[in-house]
Amino acid sequence: MKLAELLKGIPVLEFHADEALEITGVSYDSRAAAPGNLFVAVRGYESDGHEYIGAAVKNGAACVLCEEKPEEDIPYILTDNTRRGLAVVSAVWFNNPASRLILVGVTGTNGKTTTTHLIKTLIEKCSGAKVGLIGTNYNMIGDRTVETERTTPESYELQKLFRDMADEGCTYAVMEVSSHALFLDRVYGLTYEVGVFTNLTHEHLDFHKTMDEYAKAKSLLFRQSNHAVVNLDDSYAGVMIGGATCPVFTFSTENDTADLVAKRIKVYPDKVDFCALTMEKLQKIELNIPAIFSVYNALAAVAAGLQLGFELEALAEAMKDCTGVKGRIEVVPTGRDFTVIIDYAHKPYALENIISTFKEFAPGRVVTLFGCGGDRDATKRPLMGEIAARLSDYVIVTSDNPRTEDPKKIIDDILVGMKGTKTPYIVIENRREAIGWALKNAQSGDILILAGKGHETYQIIGKEKFHFDEREVVREFLSAIS
């Protein structure tokens, strides 16, 4: 591709290169630069790409897009913002694939992953379309899973992913949009048909410094959306609505002025159901994911579906087929009178959240089985022990991924936080045996939370990774229990 063609849409301050120069590719990491590449010197949060121009030149870069004149003798173009420049040239390089996709973006602190999965399923069920997904744990092109390293990829990888989705027949792409991605222009130049805000809680203040700045970063999504969907019950809803440059559709469980309101909410150990009320219709919604925040995720997904033009009745029918995200409040079918939940909670606040959630409606005991990872932050171990003992009716302390640490030492650290507790507990170091004991001793109405492993299907002991899928373990023990 000719340099002049690649730079269409870039505000050029100075041009010191041959417009007819043939460019072989785009790179922003000097280690990935190849002969004939345009190297984009991006100013990062922790490093500055201008410092690596020399390395890119050594690897064969033919030209540099930068914000200051390079010291190296190489053709260059000056622009005022290379982050935005990278987003623009990446889109051009991949032939603007996002123009072939209907984009839905979901931002917020909690609920993004589940909400994007729900929206993906609703679109597929209501339209029959092939849908791409970009998220925290992995990306998907239809049913095919693609691994990922961050919630929202850098703009070059994002455009490449859009290209793959479009080439494989996707007509929609649903994605989590992080505050970092919005603030650092990874999604610059994209237009979302629908942008969704879930909620805002204390997080990423090492980057944004204050909650107000964090909220402002999130609200940027609604300056590049055709329709906004906002959780009216969140205290930062006003920031999102105030920052929107498009029509806003709100949802709520508390405020009857919202465009979509949940009424007659019922929470069960394995599902939720409620009546979704709009100005014109009342429709029962059922979602096979428990907890009150599942109602909010369902409302967000339904609201997005309505903005995409789907009927409420069709969305309600499709919601029945939604199963959520593997390892996130995942209900494991048991065929028994107790419930097994697998959840990735492996930090204090996450463990407290999951136990507290089920304590609100558990018909029997809440039994928590958990451990802590080795070669990781040891200070959280007694904190998690205290949380589990304070909130649970029974606790089973076991191993997680001990890695190279002594599992007994990790468990001892956990037990420090459980000193003096009146909550009964047992220590079973072997996680498989611990799960088996929990299932054999489950009582009617119990909710058994297997916390920490979530979507992982392995256990790391020493330096070896062993296959360990808790779903399989549960099925094996249940089949052996008469």
Image (cartoon, grey):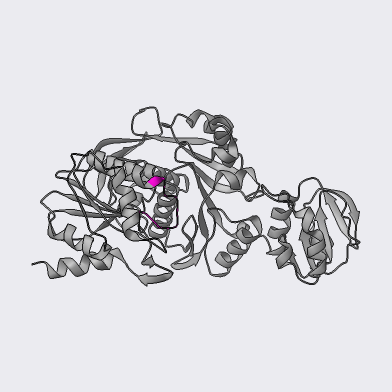
- Quarter where residue 198 is shown: top left
- Residue 471, compared with residue 330, is above or below; it is below
Residue 454 in view in this figure: yes
- Quarter where residue 407 is shown: bottom left
- Report the front residue among 111 and 5: 111
Q: Quadrant of the C terminus?
A: bottom left
Residue 343 in view in this figure: no
Magenta-colored segment: predominant secondary structure:
loop
Was residue 183 drawn as part of the magenta stretch in this picture? no
Image x and y of residue 271, in percent: 25, 49
> Viewed as shown, does residue 391 lie left or right of 259?
left
Could you tell me which residue is drawn at 44 percent across and 50 percent down? 377
Image x and y of residue 374, in percent: 40, 58
- Residue 442, compared with residue 471, is above or below; it is above
Q: Residue lying at the far left in this picture: please name it.
A: 482
Image x and y of residue 263, in percent: 28, 35
Q: Quadrant of the N terminus?
A: bottom right
**What's the magenta region?**
371-380
- Report the front residue among 207 and 261: 207
The number of numbered discs placed on residues in the rendered structure image is 0
Could you tell me which residue is drawn at 71 percent across and 66 percent down? 31
Image x and y of residue 269, in percent: 21, 48
- Residue 140, compared with residue 357, is above or below; it is below
- Report the front residue among 451 and 79: 451
> Viewed as shown, does residue 148 lie left or right of 467?
right
